[in-house]
Amino acid sequence: MSPAPCCNMPRWPKETRLRNRSGNIIKFLAFVLLAGAAAYILFFTPTGALFRTHAGRKVLVGRLDGLVQMAGPLGPAVFILIYALGTLIAPATPFTIAGAVIFGKWYGMFYNLSADVLGASLAFFLGRYFLHGIARNFLESKLPWLDRKTAEEGFSVIFYLRIFWFPFIVLNYAAGATRIRFRDYLLGTALGLVPAVFIVTYFTGAMKEVLAAYRRPADLLTVHTLLPVVLLIVSFFIPAVVKRLRKDRPPV
């Protein structure tokens, strides 16, 4: 039997590909505009100049504190939103420190963790739906194992990498290009960030309290300042412990 004439072949796959390509280009351009605006603010404005220096970040924390106070009952929500959006383009640690300074050890810990999870989720969806091509290329060239591992054990891999203090922004965007389910990513992120957020927030909040009543160097050596240091050291052994427990787990 002779093959069907080429003119009878359906054309929709090509049209679909062109439509998808156009959609991807529009999404990419939208993100480029967003990234361009963020880069302009970060490198060519007085606010961005402050963010790039230690002294400047102190000033920004003060301004953020004032903004939170002005917002009244909505202050925590304003802080969480600014923190989450900020982590799309900048490291999370300065925002975490700001949360501890503004809200203290305990409330700061809750708000910091909420903002981290929200920011990580936003970056995940940007990586999946707006930057999939770029994130995918980065994934295949720099982290080829991540896609395979997350497809097999999504929660465990994300949890492990968060515990191991893997670069926050890199993992957020790269995970969006993998085959991981968002539910596994969200749970692994929320639980895996707890130690890091606790250590940074608690230590900063404790130092703020100690320095407020500081009289002599011995005042720095308190349970509240030493506990986060001990936990930081212990946290470096958590990945090995988790790996050992998973290896010793009997097969289902």
Image: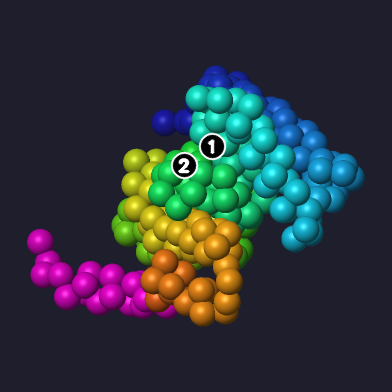
For the question of whether residue 148 can be seen, the reply is no
Q: Position of residue 12 (x, y in %)?
A: 56, 22
The residue at the point 58 percent across, 54 percent down is 97
* Magenta stretch: dominant secondary structure: helix
Q: Is residue 140 magenta?
A: no
Q: Position of residue 40 (x, y in %)?
A: 84, 41
First in residue order: circle 1 vs circle 2: 1
Q: What label sits on residue 51 in the rendered view?
A: none
Location of mark 2 (residue): 111
Q: Secondary structure at mark 2?
A: helix
The residue at the point 47 percent across, 77 percent down is 221
Q: Which residues are magenta?
A: 231-252
Q: Within 10 Å of the Cα at label 2, are there few (<14), some (14-19), or many (20+) other Cα atoms?
A: many
Which residue occupies the foreground of this view, 118 or 130? 118
Marks 1 and 2 close (CB-CB < 8 Å) = yes
Q: Secondary structure at mark 1?
A: helix
The residue at the point 39 percent across, 61 percent down is 195
Vertical comparison of 141 with 56: above or below = below
Which residue occupies the foreground of this view, 23 or 183? 183
Vertical comparison of 118 with 159: above or below = above
Q: What label sits on residue 80 in the rendered view?
A: 1
Q: Which of the 4 image quarters holds residue 222?
A: bottom left
**On the picture, is 186 further left or further right than 67?**
left
